[in-house]
Amino acid sequence: MGSLCCSCCTMFLISLSFLSIFKGATSATFTLVNKCEYTVWPGTLGTPKLDSTGFELPKGTTRSFQAPTGWSGRFWGRTGCNFDSSGQGSCSTADCGSSQLECNGNSAAPPATLAEFTLGSGSQDFYDVSLVDGYNLPMLVEVNGGSGQCASTGCVTDLNRKCPAELRVEGGNACRSACEAFGTPEYCCSGEYSSPTVCKPSSYSEVFKNACPKSYSYAFDDASSTFTCTGADYTITFCPNSPSLKSAGDSDPKTADETGTGTEEGLGIAGSGEVEQATLASSWLASLATGDSTTTRHSFSLLLATASFIFCYIHL
C-alpha cells in the first residue's frame, strides 16, 4: 500500500509539473482572414518578430502565426501592391517603406487600419483596433477561447465612403487622420495638447468614432477602445462584411458607391448575432480537437492533474 501511495504521489507531482510547464509555455495564435474581394498584403510588426513581417494573402485565404506570451505588436493590411518575383515592390495604401514584400521591422505608412496587441505573461492581453493613423480597409478582431470580457472589436464600416473630402486620399482608397492631413498640435495631441485633459475629440475624429464606436479615433480615446482577455487566440478579418468571395476577380480596392450594404451591428455581419456565437463555438470545438487553443492546453493539464489526484485518493 505504501508503495502504491508513493507512486500515486509521484504521479500527482508529475501532473502538476505538466500543468506548470503548459501554463508557462502558452502562446496565442493569430489567424488572419481575407474576405475582401481583392488580395491583401498584411504587414506585421512586433517583438519578438513573427514568422513573417509581410506576405501575400489572396482573397478567401487565411494564415496563422504563433506569438509567445509577452509579445507586443500590430497587424495591418496593405492594398494595391505590386511585387516582382524577387519580392521587390510597393503598395498604394499602408506601405511599410521597405520596398519589399517583407516589412522587415517597418510599420505602416498612414493612413492604415491597425490591430494592436500586447499579450500578458499569465495575465490579461490588451488589444484594440486603431484609426489614429487613419483608415484604409475594414477590419474585425474576434476572440477564440480565453477568459474575461473578451469582446470583439474593429471597424467594419467602409470609412472610405464617409471620408471628408479634405481627408480623402487621391483615388478614394484610404482616409487620412486629421493629424496627418493638417499636422497641428490640437489634432495630433502634441505640444501643449499632449494630455487627455486638453486634447479632445475633433469633428474629424468623431466621424471615425460614429462609424466605428469600438475603435480608437484619436490618441486619448482609451475608455471605449481598449479591450482585455486572458489566454485567448485571435482572428483578424479584413473586409468582414464582404458580400461574396465567389465572384469578381482580384483587383485593386475601389471606393464603393453610396448604395453599398453592410452594417456594424454587433461588430459582425448584419443580423448575424446567433451566427457569430455559433462560429465562436465551432472555433472553440475545433481548437479542442486539434489542441491549438490556449484554454484547451490549460484544461488538458488541469484535467491530468485532477485525474491523478482522484486516482491516488481512491487507492489510499
Image: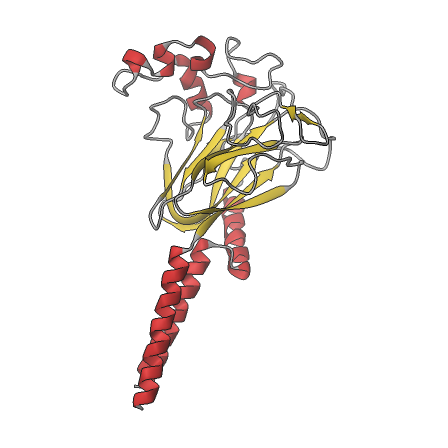
Tell which residue pokes out farthest to the bottom in this image: 1
Rendered position, 168 above or below 17: above
Query: Quarter of the image holding residue 239?
Result: top right
Residue 80 seen in this snapshot? no
Rendered position, 277 above or below 10: above
The one of 208 and 31 positioned closer to us in this rendering: 31
Q: Is residue 153 left or right of residue 238?
A: left
Q: Residue at x 48, y 20 (%)?
A: 134
Tell which residue pokes out farthest to the left in this image: 197
Is the C terminus in the top left, top right, bottom left or bottom right quadrant? bottom left
Q: Is residue 51 left or right of residue 316?
A: right
Is the N terminus in the top left, top right, bottom left or bottom right quadrant? bottom left
The image position of residue 150, as x and y in percent, is 40, 44
Rendered position, 143 above or below 156: below
Total labels: the figure holds 0
Q: Residue at x 55, y 56 (%)?
A: 286
The image position of residue 259, as x and y in percent, is 62, 21
Please name the colour scheme applied to the rendered image: secondary structure
Q: Is residue 101 left or right of residue 71?
A: right
Rendered position, 202 above or below 61: above
The one of 48 and 77 positioned closer to us in this rendering: 48
The image position of residue 198, as x and y in percent, is 27, 15
Residue 165 seen in this snapshot? yes
The image position of residue 304, as x and y in percent, is 41, 70
